Amino acid sequence: MISSSSGVAQKDIRIIKSQPSFRNLLTELWRSKRLVFAHAVREIKIRYTPSVLGIAWVLIQPVLVTVAFAFLFSRFSNLASRDIPYPLFTFVALLPWQLMTSGISRSTTTIVDNKHLFTKVHFPVIILPLAGTIVSLLDFFVCTMFVCILFIYYSFTPSANIVIFPLMLFLTLYITAGIGVMFSAFTVKTRDIGHALPFGIQLSLFLTPIAYDAHLVPEKWQMIYSLNPLVSVCLGFRWTLLGADIPLDMFLISITVGFIAATTGFIYFNKARTHFSDVL
């Protein structure tokens, strides 16, 4: 309330605080696209420059996992399609799994790890978790070279469905980025996500159809199993690259859950980002 000594009637003054719109977030991100890639390059240098093997570490984990699965499970012919070599069957599913889990893992703590930047410069904070997804995308492209080697070694011809592969990759990146930015916003308020995530990633390796065919999941558990967004990307990659038969209903449920989760993540991040500087 403002009083006037000249007898003017008192008036109410309302202060309306504008909320950041999702459109403004996309506009800021587009204007700062060079900054996003610059931060991603910085993260790549920090991660691989001091290492002796460098970027070769990207291949070590999925190759060792594939070898372990092949050694343990390849004798069970019902785990994979009979027409697809088991190592190729496994590694193709590991590609999107590694892309999503590493991207989400990097994005989750990136805001907390770079909180010193909030007091130095103004920038669209979403570039921090998105840079984690871009770094994981580079790792993904390195691993695809090994997939090409497997195709040549087994004389296996890629499926004609490969024309859909760019769309499947885009959906995988969208889900990864959306869940990653959501977890990064959660981590600003509580560090529990960062502690629970490594266990969740290890568990997802067995709750995702990587070492086995999704058709082997008991029918009574398929609905719950389909709520895992990782299921859809692994099935999608197998269908586009190998032409493997996949449960369509399981794929559609899983991809829908992933798309909704990612979209919700972007919306939540957009609302929460205005309070990051206060919490950090």
Image (spheres, rainbow, N blue to C red):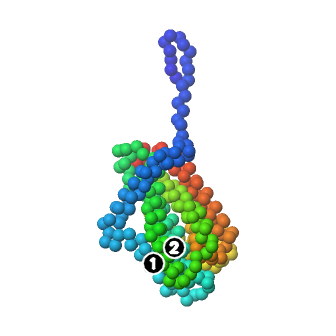
- Residue found 45% across the figure and 48% down from its top: 32
**Would residue 72 be visible to someone looking at this image?**
yes
Say which amino acid is labelled 1.
Val
Q: Position of residue 90 (x, y in %)?
A: 54, 78
Q: Earlier in the sequence, mark 2 or mark 1?
A: 1
Which residue is at the far top?
6
Element under disc 1: helix
> Which residue in the protein does label 2 denote?
94
- Residue found 38% across the figure and 53% down from its top: 114
Q: Position of residue 254 (x, y in %)?
A: 62, 65
> 54 or 20: nearer the eye?
54
- Residue found 51% across the figure and 65% down from its top: 100
Q: Write down the quadrant of residue 225 in the picture.
A: bottom right
> 133 or 19: nearer the eye?
133
Q: Position of residue 212 (x, y in %)?
A: 58, 79
- Residue found 61% across the figure and 66% down from its top: 164
Neighbourhood count class around disc 2 (C-alpha, 10 Å): few under 14, some 14–19, many 20 upward: many
Q: CA distance from mark 2 to mark 1?
A: 9 Å
Q: Does residue 34 sit above or below 231 in this rendering?
A: above
Contact flag, marks 2 and 1 (Cβ < 8 Å): no
Q: Does residue 187 sit above or below 121 in this rendering?
A: below
> Which residue in the protein does label 1 denote?
63
Say which amino acid is labelled 2.
Leu
Q: Is residue 119 left or right of residue 77?
A: left
Element under disc 2: helix
> 135 or 202: nearer the eye?
135
**Would residue 238 be visible to someone looking at this image?**
no
